Image: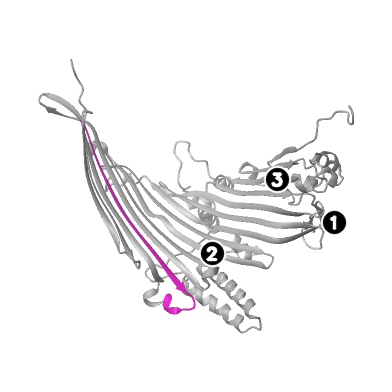
Amino acid sequence: FNKKMIDLGVDNLHNQTVTLNMKPKLPDIAGITNYIDITGTFNTSYQWQDPMQQDKSIKDLAKRAGWNNTIRFNTAIRLRAMSDSWFGVMPASPTKRPTTNKLDSTTLGSVVDGIGKSLKTIFLDWEKIDITLNQTNSSLNPGVYGSTGLSNFWTRDLIGGSSLNEYGPSAAYQLGLVEHPHGGFKVRGKNSFPFFYFDTYAGKRPPNGVMQDNFNQNTTFDIKTSRPLWEGAVLDLTWKTTLGFNRNQTVETDANGNPTFTNIIAMESFNRTFFTFPTVFGFNPFNNTIDHVVELYNGRKGAILNSNLDTITKNKQLQRALAESFYEGLEAFSITPGRAGKFLPSFNWGIRWEGLEKWSLWKSLIKRMTVDHAYMSTYQENVNITDRGRAIQNQVVQYGFSPLIGVNATFDDKKLDGTLTATLRWSTTTSYQLNTAARSVISNQNTNEITAQASYLMRGFEFPLFGIKLKNDLEYSFLFTYKANKTGTYDVLDKSSYQGQNKDGRTLTGNTQIIIEPRARYSISNRLTASAFFRYEGTFNEGAAQPGYHTTQVGVDLKINIAGGR
């Protein structure tokens, strides 16, 4: 009771968490609220620390504050059920779900209804659409005024006042809404829609200081949906975009605490699902080829070289023109042009077909059989941002079929007196990469991989030996792998590097790997176990100093378990 009514000591560490859960409800138009669920979460963890510096001139400079927050919105749309209610389609039976709703067009009463039903089948028979937006942010800032900020949060901003520096970081900072400890925002008006905007300000920092701030942000936007194609087959579609941003900057303050930001170094990463398509038998319907990249680049190059710009500026614009041509030339198509089109993801797909064991061709032999196919493609971009501007460091376009075709089969053990399973998988991947350091050179890598596996297991079969019935296990397995890698380059300034015999680029390195491995294992009543294997592994190089190698291994293993005595 000396200086305060209750003295709890001097604060040196303060942690605070604010969580807000939201579930907005849309206007109930045509019953959509029964089929659309929207949920959201806002969570911010704030921390303040005082190392108890005794020197008053740097006491506030030694303090630090930071926050981490997560913002997430998820929308689930049961599109098929909603469209069924619009078209009066009865719900599917709980015991059997039809793949399509077969309605006789004569019962619809008009051709228009028939067209409407067809459009519904094509565009609206998607089971569920999940749309997710997730963002994580963090800010770390040494050098803050005052105390923990608790008073600003509870006694200033909540009652309509403004934060005071002597109380610590502002409430907006504690909520993770601004990146500067004593910053904030104001609502400003404007003449166009939505007629207002938020104007942020940095605020002051402890005087005569040099501090290092860090801000990090990661945003993910993805969409998932699926639908039946025919009996046993399901199509999955995915869209995904990921944006990453990290910035380090030096904060210098004058005697009044006014900050100046210098030595700004930021990295921006961008990754989204992409759509490009390979050339098949010399035909590419979308013209997304290296030839198209060069064509776009040459069109931009001429205008830049004929301009009155200085040499340094021309080189920067030539590099930017190549980066834009690389992206546009390898993209199959874009629904939305401009910057929005670059951000919005394209679709990737996957198809899984079950129930092929019902085919009469092998119905009596195969117990279960599935076929898989998936297309995956991404575009990646890394950008460096400094005081001198923004520059793309590297770009990567990757696409492939993983698998192009995959088959899994389990055979009828009653027919074969044992369990036989077999898997066949063929995958292919292609990537193109453009680095600023390589200037006009685009690198390319192709990978083809085929894997075949089979295993057969027979358990507990008996045969007599010297009047004794012995229980035996027999197991066979087989593995075959073929993998071919090829790395090449294209020089957009040299036609011979991407035309004629070099249409797949000039080969730098290439290698082919082959593995063949059969194995057998035989066990007699857990007393005698014999196994044998053969493994061939070869690597054959192309365009490298070493021609390659191959190894052959043969092994036999025999184990006898003897037990007994008087």
| Alpha carbon distance from label 1 to label 3 | 27 Å
Residue drawn at x 46%, y 41% as measured from the top left: 97
- Indicate which disc residue 395 carries: 2
Q: Which residue is mark 3?
A: 67
Which comes before the other along the chain, label 2 or label 3? 3
Label 1 SS: loop
Label 2 SS: strand
Residue contact at pointers 1 and 2, CB within 8 angstroms: no
Asked if residue 364 lies left or right of residue 370, the reply is: left
Q: Quadrant of the rendered structure where residue 47 is?
A: top right
Q: Is residue 494 above or below residue 437?
A: below
Q: Is residue 415 above or below residue 130?
A: above
Q: Nearer the viewer, residue 274 or 361?
A: 274
Mark 3 closeness class: few <14, some 14–19, many ≥20 residues within 10 Å: many
Boundaries of the magenta span: 472-498
Q: Is residue 223 above or below residue 566?
A: below
Q: Quadrant of the rendered structure where residue 485 is?
A: bottom left
Which is closer to the viewer, label 1 or label 2? 1
Give the amino acid type for the residue marked by disc 2 in the picture. Answer: Gln
Image spot of residue 26 (x, y percent): 69, 45
Report if residue 192 is visible in the image.
Answer: yes
Give the amino acid type for the residue marked by disc 1 in the picture. Answer: Ala
Image spot of residue 297 (x, y percent): 54, 76
Image spot of residue 566 (x, y percent): 18, 15
Give the amino acid type for the residue marked by disc 3 in the picture. Answer: Trp
Residue drawn at x 49%, y 75% as measured from the top left: 492
Label 3 SS: strand
Mark 1 closeness class: few <14, some 14–19, many ≥20 residues within 10 Å: few
